[in-house]
Amino acid sequence: MEKISDNLAFGGRQQQWRHQSAALGCAMRFGVYLPPAAAQHKLPWLLWLSGLTCSDENFSHKAGAQRVAAELGIALVMPDTSPRGEEAADDPAYDLGQGAGFYLNATQAPWSRHYRMYDYVTQELPALLRGQFPLNGRVAVAGHSMGGHGALVCALKRPQDYVSVSAFSPICHPVKAPWGRKAFAAYLGDDETRWREWDASLLLAERGSPLPIRVDIGLADPFLAEQLQPDALQKAARESDSRLELHRHAGYDHSYYFVASFIEAQLRFHARHLLA
Amino acid sequence: MEKISDNLAFGGRQQQWRHQSAALGCAMRFGVYLPPAAAQHKLPWLLWLSGLTCSDENFSHKAGAQRVAAELGIALVMPDTSPRGEEAADDPAYDLGQGAGFYLNATQAPWSRHYRMYDYVTQELPALLRGQFPLNGRVAVAGHSMGGHGALVCALKRPQDYVSVSAFSPICHPVKAPWGRKAFAAYLGDDETRWREWDASLLLAERGSPLPIRVDIGLADPFLAEQLQPDALQKAARESDSRLELHRHAGYDHSYYFVASFIEAQLRFHARHLLA
């Protein structure tokens, strides 16, 4: 592992690392924020999954999360959004290929060789982090847009690994949304029954969630009705008697200005579970 | 004037505008943040001047200032760092030409035609803003690096226009610093006596400052000794009996992580004067 950068921020360390990922078969970058308390003891941490076109940097630059993480004593881990480099397949569209990994394990060529972001963020990266940073076993997962979909799917498929899950503007029901249908057809193939295990609303309706879920969504989000479909997630939560706090915010859109405005509320939600 | 974007952030509006600048002879973009209180009455405001390579967007994306501005009821105005476009001269180096206007009025060809950032940020832009936004006459000025130099110079040359001034990691003594010497030679010519009126340390020593000044500087800033030279500013403040709070922060560098870590402190410093 190679450290790329290291900046003091709110008394803690904001670092960027590069490593060779076995799951993805390429070099990957990730960010980590270690609050001041990391100098004293192992900390609970939040895995943040970013959205389409993002890298490991958007959240660390734009969300303002370090301030609250420093206060609460929660570390932040920020992986990239797909495999990278010439060896990994790509597509010129912003919503497929590099920058658009969708946090799943692809089964179709040419994607199946490198696009295993689910294995990467749920297994390889946490194991790597445990050996390298002062992190304990209490983990929350959150994300934005495509990363909100990823956070919900990770938490619903592996509830034993997390204490809580949240999302900003998540793609709640990708099997019915254009972004999801395009990506799932490419990564998983035409048999739509294979898509079900990567759809948060279908997973929640089927399995329920033992974890508390918080979702923040902006009512001026241009993607709300067609791509995000929070009503489907809410319906699934009701049907499965799961704990979903769905906060609808008048006037807010899909941007990081929305994330920045409510990241403190999401981090305090996770802190109740991470620090319990 | 054309509105480019408008995002709700912390209950206020983060907007990006484009207009034709008479002072600069080109189209310019700027950002403005209007806190929730702007719906009720005219607000005091902070003029933020960004550093080398920056645009009107760096501060609005990365500093996290909107949260504090919303709470305090202070508007933020974020101009670009130079004239732009094909009509304005440029240079391939990052520290000259577009993105590197140094907030002065150039006297040398080819720069003198468009590079009048001092007139733009002290006169044209404020006049434009007063007609367009709910801003009152109480103004503070702040900036980062080259923009810290700009903020100090604007406040020292036009103290009647501002109530307070602050800077992160400013170029304090550009006539003795490589960035400053290169830019001043190009924009102002070889006669170094013409440079003196654009050097914060020389201006402060000569004129003193009726305004309170706050400077935050990181002791791990790689540019500290050669480019920034805060000791020169401190010496000038002592000699002129001016009010300079110089905060030196162990471990912090030149990045926006440093700005984000202490922007709340700078905004609260300005609030004591803006809201008095």
Image (cartoon, coloured by chain):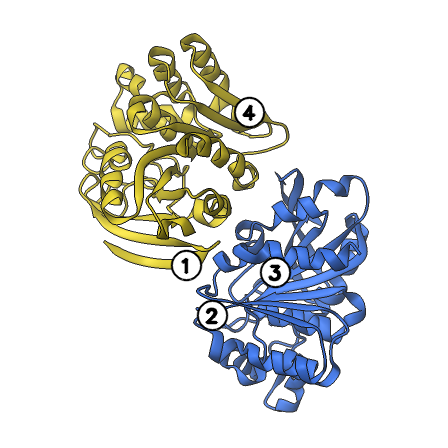
Chain colours: A blue, B yellow
* Residue type for callout 3: Asp
What's the mark number on residue B247?
A: 4
- Residue located at (28% from left, 29% from top): B104
Q: Quick check: B179 above or below A89?
A: above
Distance between mark 2 and mark 4 Cα atoms: 42 Å
Is the Cβ of the residue at disc 4 closer than 8 Å to that at disc 3?
no
Mark 3 highlights which residue? A80
The answer to whether dots 3 and 2 both sit on one chain is yes
Which quadrant is the C terminus of chain A positioned in?
Answer: bottom right
Tell me the element at label 3.
Answer: loop
Q: Which residue is mark 1?
A: B7
As measured in the structure, the alpha-carbon distance from the residue carrying label 1 to the one carrying label 2 is: 12 Å
**Secondary element type, mark 1:** strand
Q: Residues within 10 Å of mark 3 (few under 14, many from 20)?
A: many
- How crowded pointer 2 is (Cα within 10 Å; few <14, some 14-19, many 20+) is rated as some
Marks 4/1: CA–CA distance:
33 Å
For badge 2, the amino acid type reads Leu
Tell me residue A151's x, y (percent).
66, 68
Any mark on residue A219, and which? 2
Please report the residue visible at 64 percent of the width from the left and 60 percent of the height from the top.
A48
**Cα distance between the residues tagged 4 and 3:** 36 Å
Closer to viewer: mark 3 or mark 2: 2
Q: Position of residue B80 (x, y in %)?
A: 34, 43
Q: Label 1: chain? A: B
Looking at the image, is mark 2 or mark 4 nearer the viewer? 2
Quick one: B24 or B65, which is closer to the camera? Answer: B65
| Label 4: element kind | strand
